[in-house]
Amino acid sequence: MSEAVQRFEAGLADVEGAYQGALGAANSETELREANAKIVGPQGALTQLMKLMRDLPGDRRKEFGQLANALKGKVTALFDDRLAAIARAQREAELTGPALDVTMPARWSREGRLHPITRVKHELLDIFASLGFEVAEGPEADTHENCFDKLGFPPDHPATDMQDTFFLTHTERGDDITTLLRTHTSTVQIREMGRRPAPLAVVSPGVVYRRDDDATHSPMFHQIEGFLVDEGVSFADLKGVLGVFVERLFGADVEMRFRASYFPFVEPGAEVDVRRPGGKWMEILGCGMIHPTVLENVGYDPKKVSGFAFGLGIDRIAMVKYAIPNIKLLFENDQRFLQSL
Ligand code: FA5
């Protein structure tokens, strides 16, 4: 008898003797599949044995082929039986085992709510709406003209460096159009005044962008622009509106001060700081009387009408309101921090 025949016979006998024990010992579907793979899987004992068939003498091949196939059939049949038995046993255990515990606490699902910046924005807009301001919005990407030129920034004036930003270029019908991420919401003054006559009183919330980055400056932040134009509007009106606003927002015990400041689009210009009792001053807005050049640029007659404007930082107001030490906390979206507000 050839050596190959001997090996083949011995191999078949090994599988024959072991397969029932191996499949019978498996107690779960995973164990059963593993045991089955060791016999008839690609690396399994029987599969490997069948690869030896070509070494057998030609006249014995058919006989051994039939034996090997018959054995494979028995293995597969037992595997199917065992798989069904395991599934039955599992089902049986579920049915006879302890019932579903309906008293178990449900998985807690977090309830979402508005981000503090959105809440503060709504609160600010409500106050201005109650004072008679209407709400308008403008695009985040706007032209150099609306962001700087028509607001009285001279071309390439170093003042534009105050608000270093991101420029965007796209091509439209063959022309390169340059827009930029607006650095302030004052763009909406130009847009709204440009499209309708005075009198008007508008607030405009939105996102703005600058190359700024520290504890009180974020490269992306939120402003609300406000402006009012009519006959005979004076700085006293501006102080009155902002005084009511600060008191409604923070309560009577928060102090407020106007500091003279420069913005090309107002004259005179100021900044407003607020302070909680015992706290530090925090700048919350810039403001002033709309510059006559700006009024002319939007087609108004500065001899007939005048107006005031202000631009406030929503994030800064949220910082004062919730005593948040670093503006970054507002944008990290750490649930533990947001839940605490
Ligand atoms: C302006 O943006 C002017 N457009 C405001 C204005 C409007 C003045 C109308 C006069 C008339 P300023 O750069 O100071 O001004 O920004 C206004 C407010 O935005 C600041 O008072 C501050 O509260 C907030 N702010 C400015 N830069 C940042 C920043 N990087 N991160 C967060 N808040 C900021």
Image (cartoon, rainbow, N blue to C red):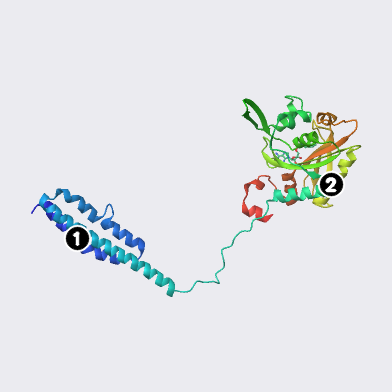
The label on residue 14 is: 1
> Quick check: 275 above or below 107?
above
Amino acid bearing label 2? Gly
Of 214 and 182, which appears nearest the observer? 182
Look at 71% across and 33% down and name the residue there.
163
| Residue 44 percent location from the top left of the image | 26, 55
> Quick check: 19 above or below 114?
below
Q: Quadrant of the N terminus?
A: bottom left
Locate residue 166 relative to residue 1 in the image: left or right. right
| Residue 106 percent location from the top left of the image | 57, 66
In this view, the residue farthest toward the left is 1
Residue 57 in sight: no
Look at 89% across and 41% down and name the residue there.
237
| Residue 315 percent location from the top left of the image | 72, 45
Q: Which residue is mark 2?
A: 132
Look at 86% across and 39% down and name the residue there.
199
Look at 75% across and 46% down and name the residue there.
317
